[in-house]
């Protein structure tokens, strides 16, 4: 079972050749953890070999729990038009994908959404998504960079920082409706290992 910690061994220079080489203590070990070769002839290859247990990418999570909240803070103009503050909350268990089509990402994850609560108005012409695909760059001990895919295009969300229990990304953006500001949308994503 993978764990989020110890992260000091997981990070360093994510994606560099140094991350993919196990430390050689003089004994026969799996020297390269990404070459599909059983270097030490023990019947185990790359991440299946305990010699690679503390070497990226073997330490990167194979699945992630995601908890997302979107909070719309309606301004006085929106409230005059009959719109109020509202929140959409959804979760997912994201599974690692073998085909990494996000060139910048270390890994990508895909999962179906479960809507926990949703009191925001819905547009019948633009239904809520039922699944999502996210990319991660495991950049440092306390920060991941998150990407999302929309209609085949990968877009960087930003840094998801470790708050002690999850890697959290938060942003607040102005919401315009037909050229008029109607409030703000605060988006919070929490990514954690199951």
Image: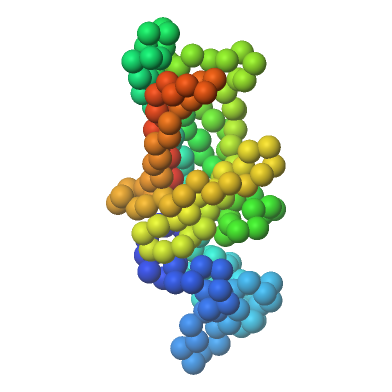
Outermost residue toward the bottom in this view: 26
Q: Nearer the viewer, residue 129 or 179?
A: 179
Q: Nearer the viewer, residue 44 or 70?
A: 70
- List x then y, in percent, for residue 181: 44, 24
Left or right, 167 with reference to 137: left
The correct choice, above or below, for 94 with respect to 127 in the image is below
Q: Which image quarter: residue 105?
A: bottom right
Left or right, 157 with reference to 165: right
Left or right, 131 with reference to 25: right
- List x then y, in percent, for residue 97: 64, 50
Query: Which residue is rendered at x = 62% and y = 42% of the image?
Result: 149
| Residue 130 appears in view | yes
- List x then y, in percent, for residue 8: 38, 69
Q: Nearer the viewer, residue 133 or 3?
A: 133
Query: Which residue is rendered at x = 35% and y = 53% of the image?
Result: 162
- List x then y, in percent, for residue 80: 38, 8
Which colour style is shown?
rainbow
The correct choice, above or below, for 22 with respect to 170 in the image is below
Left or right, 101 with reference to 115: right
Outermost residue toward the front in this view: 179
Query: Which residue is rendered at x = 39% and y = 41% of the image?
Result: 170
| Residue 117 appears in view | no
Q: Which image quarter: residue 144?
A: bottom left
């Amino acid at each position: 079972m993978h764990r989020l910690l110890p992260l000091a061994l997981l990070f360093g220079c994510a994606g560099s050749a140094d991350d993919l080489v196990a430390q050689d203590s003089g004994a026969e070990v799996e020297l390269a953890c990404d070459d599909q070769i059983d270097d030490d002839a023990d019947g185990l290859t790359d991440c299946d070999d305990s010699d690679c247990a503390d070497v990226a990418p073997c330490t990167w999570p194979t699945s992630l729990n995601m908890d997302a909240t979107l909070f719309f803070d309606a301004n006085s103009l929106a409230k005059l038009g009959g719109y109020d503050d509202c929140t959409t909350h959804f979760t997912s268990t994201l599974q690692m994908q073998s085909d990494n089509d996000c060139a910048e990402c270390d890994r990508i994850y895909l999962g179906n959404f479960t809507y926990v609560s949703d009191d925001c108005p819905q547009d019948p012409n633009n239904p809520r998504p039922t699944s999502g695909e996210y990319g991660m760059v495991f950049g440092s001990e306390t920060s991941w960079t998150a990407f999302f895919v929309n209609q085949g295009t990968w877009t960087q969300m930003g840094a998801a920082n470790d708050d002690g229990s999850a890697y959290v990304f938060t942003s607040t953006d102005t919401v315009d409706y037909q050229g008029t500001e109607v409030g703000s949308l605060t988006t919070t994503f929490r990514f954690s290992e199951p």
